[in-house]
Image (cartoon, grey):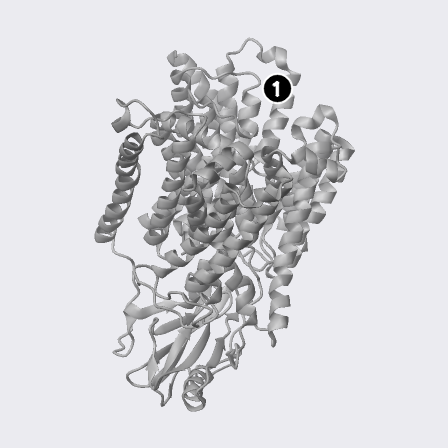
Amino acid sequence: MKGIGHFLTGIAVASCFPEAMRMTLEDNSLILMMGGAFGLLPDTLDFRVGRYLWPRQHVVTPDLSRLDARPVAETVARAIDEAAETGKPSLVKLNTLKMSANYHRTYSIYVDQERKVVRARIGPMRTMGQVMGGGGHLPRSLPEPHERGELEWEAPYKANMVNLYHAETSVGIFSGPDFAFVPDGGNVRMDFIPWHRTWAHSPFVGLLCGLLAFLVYGLIGWVQAGDPSAFVSTTSLTGFGVATLAFWGHTLVDQFGVLGSVLFWPFSDRRSGGFGWTHAASVLGNITLNFCCVALLFWNLIVHTTEANIVLPWASGMAGGYSDPVFYLLSLANYLAYFVAVPLLVLHVGARLYRRFFPERTFPKIPDEHYGSGKRREAESESEDEAGGEAIDGGSL
Amino acid sequence: MEPMMILACLGMALSGAVIAAAASLIPGLHIYNVIAITMTILFAVEHFFAGLDPMLMTSFLIGLVVGFSFLFTITSQYFQPCDDSYRYIMLPHEKFLFEGRAHEAVVLASIGSLVAIFAIGIIFPFFGQYAAVIRSLVRPHLYWIIGSVIVFLLMTEWPKDPGTGPTPLKRMLDGWGSILMGYFCFGMAGLLGIFIFHRTIIPVESSFQSLMPVFVGLFAIPSQVLTLLATVGVPRQHIAKSVEVSGEDVIRGGASGILAGMVSAFTPSLTPGPAMLLSGHATVTGGDRQFIIGGGSGRVMYYVGTLLFFFMPGVFLRRGGAAINISLFFTPETWAQFLTIAGLIVLVGALAFVGSLGYSRLASAIVSRVPYKWLSLGGMAIMVGLVGWVTSWQGLIIMLVSTCIGMVPNLWHTRRISLLAVLLVPMFLNMWGYGADVARWLGFL
């Protein structure tokens, strides 16, 4: 999911702690903000630290002046066999081809497990807005290749491959993807961006974050009260709960995608597969998550508000307030029905109807029996999009 | 309200839109600067307007804001081409200019603006009770909401290197070089903001425009300087008879902009820039067209929608320079006034949409005849002159400092959005309750 989704998840989780809401309203505490930060932290660790520390054995950078798919396919095929022969992981980095501030030359690799070939293709130019560059509109300053190599090449490999992720990867904008070819039983497993969703997404690190928050809030309580016994308090325990659950919320949300996370680090380095219900760049998936988080946050704001006395229609005839369980549950049911279910229904039904009457524009299909079009995936959308890195700087007033 | 009065209001609003069109010819000039100058002139001849109904002057300013929010980016799009060497990323409208499609970009942005105008006209009259509730719910939480925006901006400051260094250390240094420059930029802008909020050197009589030199320095002048340094040529522009855009682009881009405008309306110091970044992530906008449409929609929703909240009974949200200036002479009271204003906005907005098409042709004709460097030089001279006239030499010093900070993102390829720390940081600290303490610790108090 996009970074904002994880951030909102963390805030929404934090708002579910009554003590966190009390601290926010009475003590001007930043604990909800902290929830957001811990919600986003796993991706920040991966994309600001983990990706740099990851080693590389094979680096592929096609030559812009001689576009050639052959070295790309052969390097990846060699890496696969190398992993099978040595019994050790073989790591590949595919670099992007930046042509200007706006244009990248794309290329793709497709690992065909049935035919045991890696097919590489030199692709079209693409803008930073992920739009294909139209030939008639290209600036003259763009470099033209002096000579042309093979625009498509197949390189055979011998090992038996296991790929649980998408079969084709397009290398487009920003930084390119990493692959790890890992010996797994008698096969070679293909891990996409192997430095991502590893230790930094594990529940164990979430617990460590919780401990850190516990220490910080404990020390603040100790200093403010001048009493060591104030170290362990509702406040510090709430800090522990918020940080841990916000972090875990990130891991849980990621499980809805394809990639999954390393759930049992430090005991295992193996990334579990996700549920495959959505993916990081899914429009409806992201909007639904963000809407649910904001709806949950607003519900908690309503319950704990000190400035407005909001009574929802279903509970309007009742005495008491949100501290009364019946009043609370009836109001919650009303809120879920009116302000969560109806908007989501409108969104999803509307989107389906729209797509039915206005089908997505598609380019003519290239007939190719070996290409699994349904399994095509953009490498950068799973990585940079998810991390909250964006191509567009809206830095204007 | 009398029909003649409504017609008079419409006339005043259209006059405002015409003034906005003239002022929009200066690239980089901000709407609130124009309003401030207009107000200065109006107060100087106060006796002349004393007998007029305040609704008329209000309508004039409404027209000014609506017209400006449609038109003020058009000249920047044509007159400020982007030089690759100073940028990591080219924005969609900049790319369209190089492809001879600047007019198409203008039309897309205007479509977005029109979407926002219709949303304002259709949704707002029924939105009043919810807006009041949301405002009362959110008000005690604004400090951590602004803090969260800051944290999100900092945590998503992303490395601009493609990660091709030979060793992990080299890659780490390459990546963190641009991240740290982004943080540096954020820190410097934040410090400047704290200084401006707590110990500005702007003369007291000009204090209503204390932010003018800051924003001119941070955003407008660096853009003009880069235009002067640019070595690129603007190709001949094609005025297309039709525009290629899907309903999905309009819906998703428009929705993203509307969301950004609404969020920034309720959150002090959150301008459309960071709000668009947040809403773009939240609604997963994709492609150049959605970005441009969202920009047009977000601008109008922020400037115009926020202003309409000021007239909404039960809400009366006084956000932004326009609302603050109108509140000096007009107190909104009734739904009739609100509906009149909403109607004016829709009418003037629809006319501004049509006008923007001609305005784009005008800008295209100008840039094909006058070298853009001369236009930038002229624009820069006008803005420096305005800053000097309104805020005296002290303002010029602040503008110079701001310009130095504003150049950093351009030279180190970091996000310009970090510069908005100039508002976010002091507002966050003040609302959190520690603004004065921090300013005292920094020696500003």
Q: Residues within 10 Å of mark 1 (few under 14, many from 20)?
A: some
Judge left or right: residue B94 versus residue B131: right
Residue drawn at x 25%, y 53% is A355
The answer to whether any part of residue B99 appears in the image is no
Mark 1 chain: B
Q: Position of residue B189 (x, y in %)?
A: 66, 45
Number of numbered labels in the structure image? 1
Nearer the observer, A68 or A19: A19
The answer to whether any part of residue A270 appears in the image is yes
Q: Position of residue A41 (x, y in %)?
A: 50, 56
The residue singled out by tag 1 in the image is B42
Residue drawn at x 30%, y 22% is A319
Q: Amino acid at mark 1?
A: Leu
Q: Quadrant of the C terminus of chain B?
A: top right
Q: Is residue A46 above or below residue A396?
A: below
The image quarter in which residue A369 lies: bottom left
User: What secondary structure is found at the residue carrying circle 1?
Assistant: helix
Nearer the observer, B365 or A173: A173
Q: Position of residue A384 (x, y in %)?
A: 47, 61
Nearer the observer, A141 or A382: A382
Q: Is residue A351 above or below residue B10?
A: below
Judge left or right: residue B445 versus residue B77: right
Nearer the observer, A29 or B210: A29
Q: Is residue B141 above or below residue B89?
A: above
Q: Quadrant of the N terminus of chain B?
A: top left
Q: Is residue B193 above or below residue B99?
A: above
Residue drawn at x 34%, y 76% is A163
Q: Position of residue A309 (x, y in %)?
A: 39, 24
